[in-house]
Amino acid sequence: MSVPVVFNEALNLQQLGIPESSIKHGSTSMESDKWIVCVEPNQVTMVDLQNGAQVTKRPIQAEAAIMNPVTNVLALRSGTTLQIFNLDAKAKVKSHTMPEPLVFWKWTSVGNLGLVTATAVYHWALEDANPPVKVFDRHQTLGPNSQIINYKVSPDGKWCVLGGISAGAGGSVNGNMQLYSLEKKVSQPLEGHAASFASIKIVGREDPAQVLVFHEKKAASPPGEPPKIFVMEVGRDPAKGQPFRLPPTAIPVPADAAADFPVSLCVDGKNDIAYLLTKMGYCYMFDIHSGKTMYRAKVTQDTIFVTCVQESTGAVFGVTVRKGQVFRLQLNGQALIPYITSTLRDNDLAIKVAGRLGLPGAENLYAAEFERAIGSGNVLEAAQLVARSGNALRTPATIARFQQIPAQPGQPQPVFQYFSTLLETGRLNEQESIELAKPVLQQGRPQLMEKWLKDDKLQCSEALGDLIMPVDAAMALSVYLRAECHAKAIQCFVHRGEYDKIVPYATSVGFKMDYSTMLSQLLATNPQGALDLAKGLVSAEGGPLIDIQATAEAFLSSNRVQETTAFLLEALKDNKAEHAYLQTKLLEINLIGGAPQVADAIMQQGILTHYDRPHIGKLCERAGMWQRAAEHYTEITDIKRVFKNSHQMNPEFVVSYFGKLNREQSIMLLKDMMSRGPQNMQVCVEVAKKYHDELGSEHLVEVFEQNKATEGLYYYLGAVVNFSEDAFVHFKYIQSSCMLGQFKEAERVCRDSNIYVPEEVKEYLKGAKLADPRPLIHVCDRFDFVDELTEYLYLNSLLQYVEVYVTKVSPTKTPQVVGKLFDLGANEDFIKRILMAVGTACPVDELVEIAETRNRLRLLQPWLEARVATGSTESGTHNALGKIYITLNRDPKAFLLNNMFYDPKVLGPYCESLDPQLAFIAYKKGAGECDDQLIQVSHTHGLYRDLAKYLVERQDLDLWAKVLNKETEGEEKTEEDPQRRQLIDQIVEWALPESTNADEVSVTVKAFMAADLPGELIVLLERIVLQGSDFSDNKNLQNLLILTAIRADSTRVAGYIDQLDNFDAKDIALICVSESHMLYEEGYSIYVKFSKPEYTQDKDDQVEMQVLAIGVLVDYMKDLDRAKTYATQCDEKPVWSKLGQAQLEEKFPADAIESFIAAEDASEYIKVCDAANEGEIWTELIPYLKMARKSLQENLIDTELIYAYAKTGNLTDLEVFVNGPNVANIQSIGDRCFSEGLYQAAKTLFTNINNNSKLALCHIHLEEYREAVAAATKANNVSTWKHVCFACLRSEEFRLASTCGLEVIKYPDHVDEIVSYYSDLGYFTQVVSLFEQGIGLEDAHIGIFTELGVLYTKHVPEKVMEHCKVFFTKLNVSKVVRACERARLFSSAVYLYMQNKEHDSAVKIMMERAPAWDNDLFLDSIVKVRNAEIMYKAVGYYLTMHPTLFTRLMEVLEENIDHSRVVSQLRRTGDWALQLAQPYLKSVQKFNLSPVNEALNELHVEDEDYEALRKSIDGFNNFNMIALASKLSTHELLEFRRISAYVYRCNKKYSQSIELSKNDRMWKDCIDTANESQDGEIIEGLLRFFCETSEKECFCAALYTCYSHVSPDVALELGWINGYHNFVMPFLINTFRHTHERLKKLEDRTAPPTEEEAAQDSIAQTYGNLGGFGGTLMLENGGGGIPMPTQVPGPGGAGIDMSSFGVPQQPQMAGPGVPGMMPNGGMPQQMMPQM
């Protein structure tokens, strides 16, 4: 039987590359069926479940990440920082830092994130920018020791439930939950592990019920009491009634899952089912409406840590820890109801669930209940039962039952009660809707129908629409549309006049119809409707459904120009090339027909582009539409002709038109327009402006210059010069500006433009001799033609412009101007006046350089002093004055010392050649910028004392490095630099001793250290520290002295340690004992010296020094004996502790334990325990562990103490200790003792912790089997039962083994192991007895019954069949049947196969094993096989083994077998097989199969049964008739030869048929065959044959029968030649009669028309001429059409030429009913002579 839950693995996270360590609670989240998010060490991995499990990895550092259940919004957490990102927008939405760490978080909805901390719960809304809002505080039952595993909010957002777990007594896991009301602000604690909210629809209630489904298991409940499932409504308004609540229901927990607990509760909102998933992998399925458990199964062996529900299907997804299996659980609706009825045997639950969910399987139950309700007269209950039954009872028979029930007085009809109940609960089906509509419409209440249709309460159908159509066409249309009755819907559209909706509807639904006929009818009656329909037809999706040209012709033939235009606009909107002619005609009929504005509007829209543009252009030109004409011309001659009227065109059009021409055409047209006078100049300028880049400035300038249009050139260039980068344009603009006197524009361009060629413009301006030289000034200033400008202005006596230039335009160019004036020999007073006018704006350095090069520096002294007087601080000014003062020797030293603004780098070198001391002063004034020059001048001129003093005062280490590090890099040091030696002597002897600044001394010492001068540094420091100075007690200098000695001369270190007292002892000692120096004794001495009270007053510091001292002995000197002596002297606990650690590391555990005991130090208990175990000194370890327990309560200490007791055999102390308070890990130490064979100790330990599983094993090893069974009973664990069972079995304790075995075989996974173990030991009887007892167990499973059946096949075969029949439903059939086959018990195997619906295998066994064959069983099975090949094997088997039963077999297989293949198989078997199968062949001939027909026909011929053969041929014609006819044509019997002729005749082989009939003188057959052929030659040949053989009567009969196909001349000829006048006369009389009737009808049809008809024809032809159409309009998909009058040309051929629209008229062909032709049956009976 199928189970009601479908379980399968959707994907595996490990296979997607997600590491195992990241698949756990807190690292992996699944908020919905869209995404799984995993946090890895350096990235976040996202699995898109909606896109084929596509994996996306992002390099994000985070502790946790969860994806929004609906949108691609990701929340990240790192510490207390939360961030939310929108992945689609690639933007951060918001972020926040929490006041305390989060312990759990979850999306409670698409817009809210729930945050749980150690103390409270917060909600963080996604939409706004507000921070998280505190919702409530955690209840005390959910304290800090609880792990939060879930948080959910109700659908209405008013209730919250928080769930967590915590450790309980005895290793159990307690669950606590907190239910909180947001409205009432109150909490209620619940004892349970999982909960969820659901919204369900309660029967008999209008409003939905919001219920809380939760699991309850109280910690104080007695052992064995099962947990319960609660369902109760929350948040209902008391005014609406009592809330929904179910009594708690016990959950059936299996025996092996007593310690199991739920981890998740998911609600399938689609089916109102709750799934409870547990840690051990069990799944429980509950019905929320009743609270009953519907199914329980173990779906996985791993723990599920995260789940979610797929809302669309109701499926539940879950992820297993570590392995990463993503599984899917979903309701199996087809199997649920059968499972409830057969397994749970709860018919009431089955009826309710089946009705609510519409599931199959409860039909019989519903039917019984329905009959009961009807029988008791309870109509309402019966109606409600039908409504709840889904589709099981909603049949026409049910409606009839209600209609037959008589109505009670004062009550509505039962059938109306029935329909009312159905409408309240759902939607009526098709038959119900029709039956309800009939009385409602009869009562005239269509509004009810409209309401029900609007509410979708009725199922629409064609029959329902037909009922409504006479009452309300709109409502009927709605019904037809919903029922997809396309033809009826289109009829409604026509009836309502909604023609524009017909084509879109028909196209959308793919409905084909004849639009031509409909359009033809509408054109005459409703032209606008025809237009709407025609538009829809040409705009249909997939292409036009009518011929566009023919349709346009039809509209024009009715003089509908406006409609024609509208239609063609719609038809040609796609602008296809193949419609070029139609586009031309559309514009032509409007341009010529008096509506040029329509044509202009069409061309303005630009929707048509493929028409004949030159032709349309000519028409536009005739109509005076010059712009449109120009648009359509491409030849320049045509364009020039049109543009003669350019003054009548829109200037904007003219300008834009040039964009369509190429360069040559545009230039030619511009020249032509300019040549006609100045009236076109403005528009030509606009053209030149717009198309400057395309036409080229050279050509445009040439056009204007040729026509001497300087003004036009100026305006054109003025518009483009600001944007042009063409130097030619800029030059021509400057030129035209100057020519027109626009000097301001010329100056602007010269000043601002960077494009023109400066030399060209400069030469032009100089040659132009302008009265205003400002353009030239700007050009020369910008491009550095200052010398030429100065010379031009000076030589042209424009000196005022020189002064203007240097003061107003470019003061920075003053030095160049002055230099050029010097060269030109200008007056010095003029130059001074210029300088004074420029003032401070003139650059000093450049002017001084120019004056110096020309030896005119003295000239600048007044100007320089004036600048200084104004407060100038420019270094150039002061440099120049300094040079002047130094040269003139005007107190230069005072200037160098006091002036703050000169540049030492300039005056220093200037002074070196005059006075080095002045250069030193200048360089020193540089404050470090001239240190290199200062050092150089000091060395060069021996200024060492000054340099030494300068170095000490500067305190610059970089400067010290320059003078002390004199050796060149890469060269070896040979001898000391004498200059450095002299400098060092000056420093030691004079500079440093004179200093009283500590910083100066410190920097100097650092400089010596950096220069790697240890010898000099020691001398320097001894001079400072040891010889008495202000710095003798300086700690830093003492440190430095010792450190320098350590590095340079270690022999002095000990002496310095004794002499000095104010240094950093710890740091110095660390340096002494470092690997680079290894001065261990010196370091030990420092620690010992400073551990004395006179140097260290604090006791703790003294102890620290003692620890460091012993550390030197044990860590560096490795002298443990000396260290022990020192520790004894100190007798301090830290010292003993340090010694103990060293002894422990050196593998002296006993000594180390002694030291640790002396130190009372238990900190290294882990290492001590490891060392003691390694050295097996458990006796020495016990005192240490007892000491450690005084200060520490650690698991390892107590555990190792127990182990030590066990190893030393001190079981008494062990038992006392274990029973007392301790924190030992009893389980682990018990396992350790057990693994090492200490079973007595292990028994004591396991007894203490009630680990009955291991206790049982201990009893086994101690051969205490009864005690082992008792312990196993308490453990109730399958593994324990199994071990005890095997042990008892080995000891031949069969009764005890059976007791244990019964418990083991309850678990299917262990059945095989039990059987194998019993069998290996040869205890077959015992194992059979065990399983016979097992089938009587209350929870016996399928494996027990199966395995017992297998054992019966091996050891008790006589019981197999009985066992299979009694317990078939509880067997694993495949396994038992294989065992039966191995044991050759084929009858049992056949029975099992048949019962298991494996009929293929059953049939195979019966065919292969003769003893297993049974005809009834075989026939019952053969029709149920799945492999059709077995049926054909059965055919062969019966032909061979049971031929007498073959017909019965084929009767059974008739509907399931290929009869053609069977016939082929029979032919291969032999002729006797066909004879044997003749009854079968006759029974299947009704299928008209060729092989069957041929086989039967052969049998009929062989049996000479011509009647059966003729009947077979007439009834079944699917065979090779020609072959049969050929075979029978030579048969000895006449009837078979007649059949041959008949077959030839049926196959239109008339000649062969007639020849056979002639030979047998079967004249009637000949005449009938000839008439059927309708072939004149065959008939004529037969007539001539009758004349030749003198068969007069046959001749006359042939003429009568074949009248329609005999030519009169042939009949007359043969009658006259052979003298058969009387026999041919009836034929001739009938022929003349029909000829006369045909001629009369022809005369009537060709008679001249009457006056009224002529007038109508004239009117129709006039309209035809107006439209320009001729011929017949054919709008059709076949032969029909609208005949139109033939066009009569008017005088002179006036009118629009639309001749190409015409379609030649098709001749009307006479059909079968045309007068003058006889029907295919011969002449009338009365004209036939009597034979």
Image (cartoon, rainbow, N blue to C red):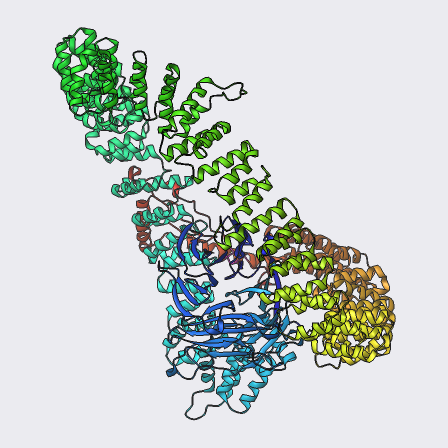
Magenta: main secondary structure equals loop
Residue at 64 percent of width and 72 percent of height: 297
Image quadrant assignment for residue 1730: bottom right
Residue at 61 percent of width and 72 percent of height: 171
**Residue 987 x/y as whole percent:** 41, 25
**Residue extent of the magenta highlight:** 1711-1717
**Residue 135 x/y as whole percent:** 39, 68
**Residue 817 x/y as whole percent:** 20, 14
On-image quarter of the N terminus:
bottom right
Q: Is residue 740 magenta?
A: no
Q: Is residue 1395 above or below residue 1695?
A: below
In this rendering, position of residue 156 left or right of residue 1127: left
Viewer-nearest residue: 1315 or 1675:
1315
Viewer-nearest residue: 381 or 1633:
381
Image quadrant assignment for residue 265: bottom right
In this rendering, position of residue 641 left or right of residue 1712: left
Q: Is residue 1359 above or below residue 941?
A: below
Residue at 26 percent of width and 24 percent of height: 669
Q: Is residue 848 above or below residue 1661?
A: above
